[in-house]
Structures are given as C-alpha cells and as structure tokens.
Image (spheres, rainbow, N blue to C red):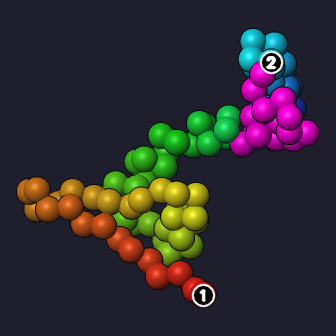
Amino acid sequence: MTFFSNIIDVSAIAAFLVWTTKNSQWNERKRHHRRLLLLELGYDFVESHLDRRRQQPQAIQRDVRLAMQVIGQTITTISHGDMVLTVVVKRRC
C-alpha cells in the first residue's frame, strides 16, 4: 500500500510540474496552487464514480448523500417513464 501511495504522490507532482509549465498563469497569485491542482485532479478521478452513484439515490447512505450535496452534486434518477425524482435533504441551521 505504501508503494502505491508513493507512486500516486510522484505522479501527482509530475502532473503539477507539467501543468504549471504549460499554464504558468493558472492561479499564480495564490500560494496554494499545488493543493488546488491536486483537489481538481482528485475530483476528476472520482467524477465518473459519483455520476454512477448519483443515479441510484435509494442505495446511497445518508452521510454519502449529504457529502455529495456539500460538494454541489444533485441527486436525481429517472424512473417510471419521464418522471424525474429529486432527493432533497434538509440542512441544519
């Protein structure tokens, strides 16, 4: 597991170097632009999995559903022809 984590870390650093070389103007005023790139990279890795889970709201646990809504994902599914069901979760004040 440690070896796999090291490979992921080294490849993320290499991706950051390539990205900043090609796009030197990207977030240059922010000091944490490496962190921003890693967050975008991580989201791109899990985006297809999120899309698949978003299509099955009845199978999603409550905590996962709340986490998906916090990051801005809407949970919808198509059932019974053209009806679209949207799951809305109330937030705490």
Asked if the residue at tag 1 contacts the one at tag 2, i.e. Cβ–Cβ closer than 8 Å, the answer is: no
Q: What residue sits 75% from the left and 26% below the top? A: 26
Front residue of 25/39: it is 25
Callout 2: helix, strand or loop?
A: loop
The residue tagged 1 is: 93
Q: Of the residues shown, which amino acid type is indicated by label 2?
A: Ser
| Highlighted range, magenta | 25-39
Callout 1: helix, strand or loop?
A: loop
Residue 62 covered by magenta stretch: no
Q: What residue sits 40% from the left and 55% below the top? A: 54
Quadrant in the picture for the C terminus: bottom right
Front residue of 1/47: it is 47
Judged left or right of residue 93, residue 50 is left
Q: What residue sits 47% from the left and 82% below the top? A: 90
Give the CA separation, mark 2 to mark 1: 41 Å
Q: Of the residues shown, which amino acid type is indicated by label 1?
A: Cys
Quadrant in the picture for the N terminus: top right
Residue 38 covered by magenta stretch: yes
Q: Residue furthest top?
A: 22
The numbered mark at residue 24 is 2
Q: Quadrant of residue 21?
A: top right
Q: For the residue carrying disc 1, how many other residues have a C-alpha within 10 Å: few (<14), some (14-19), or many (20+)?
A: few
Where is 21 relative to 55, above or below? Answer: above
